[in-house]
Image (cartoon, helix red, strand yellow):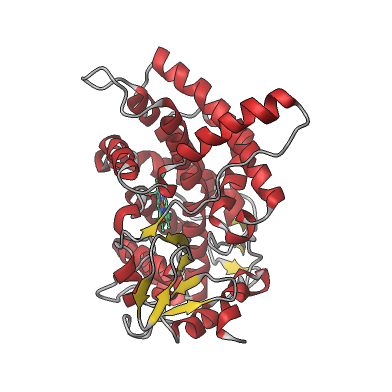
């Protein structure tokens, strides 16, 4: 396969179960220019040097563009206005400084480590209840039975979104997450579905924010919607809506993959599963190594605002840039025996949560949830065996994870 089509192969669902040989080929040149003009960056050193580079912009989504409806009022007035607002108030993950930094600081003030730590007991209870619900069965589907419901109920609780409404926005959240996938971004029909999902979830959030202002509670959304001592809210309403949507979607898709990839990896490495069962204190090490070895987010995209010379290549001005975090995480120039799952590894500076200005804001929450879930699964599932290896994967190449993970068990140990 030619170097300039390797990334196309990464996007091909046929390679979803094991993209790592392709990543090894891509790393042969730290920056590889693809036939469509995009630059794929795949070594640890090259990503580290670019991640803080202000010439890389996160504002790389095409402008919002609603399809024609045939209704002149909508086509000439309402929809162009909505498109302008949606483009100007993108979620902060798609924004550059200074707007990005202002919004991020406003969220971080409320999305504090203390707020996250306070959730620990609740996560323990949720995990136990979800595992208890599998009693009497000899098979579980980890995604359906635990990895999906756990992060969703936690993020809903933290934000203050009624959990009963979750089935309503599950499909919207899944559609919105496709904004991270290059194929879906360039597919007209998928973009229109994304706009429709965004409109629907925005309407839902607008009503919820109104309610939080009327009757504030102890949740994050009430805090973000409240006026500051100066009398102004932390952010304008359009940004508040897009931030709430971002937190909800980020809390839906990624932690699911960390727990599922985690259990899959432990079942493939039974000695490590047994060590975790015997010593739950190992959990933080196991999670860090999982974030390196099988990260939930394989890459993120940027746009080059100017020509960038790097590793003997030139990324042209305007080129789409792909930061292939998962390839950097397996870079032998940075990690000893990178293809070995080794929770005892020292000096594990992975890109599982990205890096630089856009470093994941949910990292402490994701770590707590995954630690509690994997410790409980290792202790409570009796004689767990994988039903299919590899399992079926969801279509996404960026947000990569199994669609289902069937595990046969011989019972449940008490909680
Ligand atoms: C295992 C779970 C998670 C993983 C692997 C993960 C991964 C990432 C990565 C790689 C980025 C960097 C994006 C970039 O460079 O463009 C990111 C950003 C972000 N994550 Fe996470 N994430 C996880 C969970 C969460 C959760 C639970 C939340 C919140 C509820 C969250 C909220 C965010 C936000 C708001 C950003 C954007 C930050 C910014 O642009 O400044 N993430 N995440």
| 57 or 218, nearer to the observer | 57
Residue found farthest to the right: 70
Above or below residue 48? Residue 255 is above
Q: Which residue is at 60% across, 32% downward?
A: 80
Above or below residue 277? Residue 250 is above
Residue 37, by quadrant, is bottom right
Would residue 97 be found to the left or right of residue 318 on screen?
Answer: left
Q: Which residue is at 39% across, 45% downward?
A: 124
| 146 or 217, nearer to the observer | 217
Above or below residue 176? Residue 223 is above
The mark tally for this picture is: 0
Residue found farthest to the top: 214
Q: Which residue is at 37% across, 69% downward?
A: 289
Q: Position of residue 163 (x, y in %)?
A: 53, 31
Q: Position of residue 227 (x, y in %)?
A: 30, 20
| 256 or 36, nearer to the observer | 36
| 92 or 343, nearer to the observer | 92
Residue 65 makes an appearance in the image: yes
Would residue 334 be found to the left or right of residue 382 on screen?
Answer: left
The quarter of the rendered structure image containing the N terminus is bottom right
Q: Position of residue 366 (x, y in %)?
A: 39, 51
Would residue 352 be found to the left or right of residue 113 on screen?
Answer: right
Residue 166 makes an appearance in the image: no
Q: Position of residue 321 (x, y in %)?
A: 46, 66
């Amino acid at each position: 396969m030619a170097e300039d089509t390797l990334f196309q192969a990464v996007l091909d669902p046929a390679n979803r179960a094991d993209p790592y040989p392709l990543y090894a080929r891509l790393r042969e040149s730290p920056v590889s220019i693809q036939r469509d003009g995009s630059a794929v960056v795949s070594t640890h050193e090259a990503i580290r040097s670019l991640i803080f580079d202000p010439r890389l912009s996160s504002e790389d989504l095409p402008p919002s563009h609603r399809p024609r409806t045939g209704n002149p009022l909508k086509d000439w007035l309402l929809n162009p206005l909505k498109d302008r607002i949606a483009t100007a108030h993108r979620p902060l993950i798609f924004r550059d400084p200074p707007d990005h930094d202002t919004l991020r600081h406003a969220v971080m003030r409320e999305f504090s480590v203390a707020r996250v730590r306070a959730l620990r007991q609740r996560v323990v209870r949720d995990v136990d209840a979800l595992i208890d619900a599998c009693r009497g069965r000899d098979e579980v589907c980890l995604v359906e039975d635990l990895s999906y419901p756990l992060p969703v109920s936690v993020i809903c609780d933290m934000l203050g979104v009624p959990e009963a409404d979750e089935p309503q926005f599950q499909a919207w959240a899944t559609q919105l997450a496709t904004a991270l996938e290059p194929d879906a971004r360039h597919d007209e029909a998928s973009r229109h579905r994304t706009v429709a999902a965004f409109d629907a979830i925005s309407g839902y959030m607008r009503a919820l924010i109104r309610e939080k202002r009327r009757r504030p509670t102890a949740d994050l959304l009430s805090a973000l919607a409240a006026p500051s001592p100066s009398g102004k809210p932390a952010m304008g309403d359009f940004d508040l809506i897009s931030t709430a949507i971002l937190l909800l979607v980020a809390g839906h898709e990624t932690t699911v993959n960390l727990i599922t990839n985690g259990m899959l990896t432990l079942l493939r490495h039974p000695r490590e599963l047994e060590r975790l069962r015997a010593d739950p204190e190992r959990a933080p090490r196991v999670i860090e190594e999982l974030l390196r070895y099988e990260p939930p987010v394989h890459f993120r995209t940027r746009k080059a605002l100017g020509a960038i010379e790097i590793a003997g290549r030139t990324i042209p001005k305007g080129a789409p840039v792909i930061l292939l975090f998962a390839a950097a995480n397996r870079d032998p120039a940075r990690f000893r025996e990178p293809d070995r799952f080794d929770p005892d590894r020292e000096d594990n500076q992975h890109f599982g949560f990205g890096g630089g200005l856009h470093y994941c804001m949910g990292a402490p929450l994701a770590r707590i949830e995954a630690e509690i879930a994997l410790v409980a699964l290792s202790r409570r599932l009796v004689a767990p065996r994988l039903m299919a290896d590899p399992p079926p994967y969801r279509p996404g190449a960026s947000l990569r994870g199994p669609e289902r993970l069937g595990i046969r068990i011989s019972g449940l140990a008490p909680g």
